[in-house]
Structures are given as C-alpha cells and as structure tokens.
Image (tube, rainbow, N blue to C red):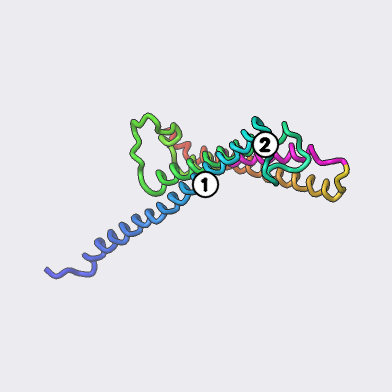
C-alpha cells in the first residue's frame, strides 16, 4: 500500500517533538559548569577561613584589600565572618539552581526515599524555584548591606566630604536594590500562590 503525505505527517511530527524534547539535555553542561563554580567557592571559603584563623588566633596580618583600611580588629573579624556567610549563601543558591533546575528542566533525579533528599525538592516547580531563588538573593543582599553599614561606620573623621557623599550614595542604592529584591520576592510568591491555588484547592 502506497503511503500518502498525510500518513507520514504524524510520524514526522512525533520525530520533531522527540528532537525538541531531547534538546533539554543541552542544559546539562550548564549545570556542570555551575558545579565547577561551586568548587571555586569552596576553595574561596577555605582560603578566607585560613586568613581568619591566622589573623584572629595566630596574630597574622590580613592580605591587602581584604578589609577596608581603618577598620578595627574586631570589626575586621566580623567582616570576614560575613564574607564566609556570604560564600555559604551563594553556594546554597548554586545548589538550588543546580538541583532544582536540573530536576525541573532536564531530567528527574529519582531520589524518592533517599534519606538526604532536600525537603523542598519533593514539590519543586518553576514557580517555587523562582521564589526560593528570590529569597536567597534577599539573604545575600542583606549580608552585603550589613557589610556596607559596618564599613561606613568606620569612615575617618578627616575623610573628604566627597568620599562621605560617595559612601552615602552607595548605601542609598544598595538599600534601594535590597528593597527591590524584597518586593520582587513578594510579587513572585503572590503570583505563584494565584497560579497554583486551583490545583491546591482541588
């Protein structure tokens, strides 16, 4: 029996659909790159931890530029600790992007029943992932803002008026950015709640 063009159309459509669906694996190298990025952050964490131990316990000196000049030893330790927390929070953000993004957009991880499966991964979707990423960005922004406040409190009295104005200008925009992150997270959570409310009610 001779095949007609109409009989070939469903087969070609299925082939095209399969090809488009397989294209999701192009994202796999991107997530592998983020894993390498996380390894760099692990190295950075232990490097800063060593500087903290050397400075706080062994009486060593900090590398130039690690903390602003004129900062006392106690505040320098505080800034380094905030830097370590910042690295950890960015690493957490990377984990959420790697695990959640791979699970949502590439392939299932098949972790059901695994004792170490993250609680949030059981109900992750694109909306939940965006809200969690926005919340993580708020935490990172808070750390940077706190570091800026600590540094701004140590501006020497003899500092030029222009330097003080630049510091105040920087603080102003960091606060604006932080508030924007908070507003964005609230908006994303509200939209996610509206989007998935019928499903939850059902």
Q: State the SS at label 2.
A: loop
Give the mark count: 2
Residue 138 is inside the magenta segment: yes
Q: What secondary structure prevails in the magenta region?
A: helix
> Magenta residues, as a range?
136-157
Res. 57 image quadrant: top right
Q: Secondary structure at mark 1?
A: helix
Q: Residue at x 49, y 45 (%)?
A: 39
Residue 181's tag is none
In the rendered image, residue 84, in percent from the top left (x then y), is placed at 60, 37
Numbered mark located on residue 40 in the image: 1
Q: Point out residue 190 in the picture as x, y percentages from the top left corner.
A: 56, 39
Label placed on residue 60? 2
In the image, is residue 26 above or below residue 125? Answer: below
Callouts 1 and 2 close, C-beta under 8 Å: no
Task: Judge left or right: residue 39 versus residue 87.
Answer: left
Query: Residue 150: horizontal and vertical position, in percent?
Result: 74, 37
Is 120 part of what is drawn in magenta? no
Position of the N terminus by quadrant: bottom left
């Amino acid at each position: 029996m001779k095949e007609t063009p109409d009989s070939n159309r469903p087969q070609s459509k299925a082939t095209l659909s399969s090809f488009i669906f397989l294209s999701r694996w192009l994202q796999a190298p991107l997530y592998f790159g983020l894993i390498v990025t996380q390894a760099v952050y692990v190295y950075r964490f232990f490097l800063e931890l060593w500087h903290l131990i050397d400075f706080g316990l062994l009486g060593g000196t900090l590398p130039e530029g690690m903390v602003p000049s004129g900062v006392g030893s106690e505040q320098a330790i505080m800034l380094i600790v905030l830097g370590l927390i910042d690295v950890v929070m960015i690493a957490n953000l990377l984990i959420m992007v790697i695990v959640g993004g791979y699970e949502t957009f590439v392939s299932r991880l098949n972790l059901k029943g695994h004792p170490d499966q993250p609680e949030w991964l059981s109900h992750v979707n694109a909306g939940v992932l965006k809200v969690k990423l926005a919340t993580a960005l708020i935490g990172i922004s808070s750390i940077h803002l706190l570091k800026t406040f600590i540094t701004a409190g140590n501006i020497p009295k003899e500092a030029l008026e222009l330097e003080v104005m630049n510091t105040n200008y920087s603080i102003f925009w960091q606060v604006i950015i932080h508030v924007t992150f908070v507003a964005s997270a609230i908006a994303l959570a509200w939209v996610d709640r509206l989007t998935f409310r019928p499903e939850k009610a059902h």
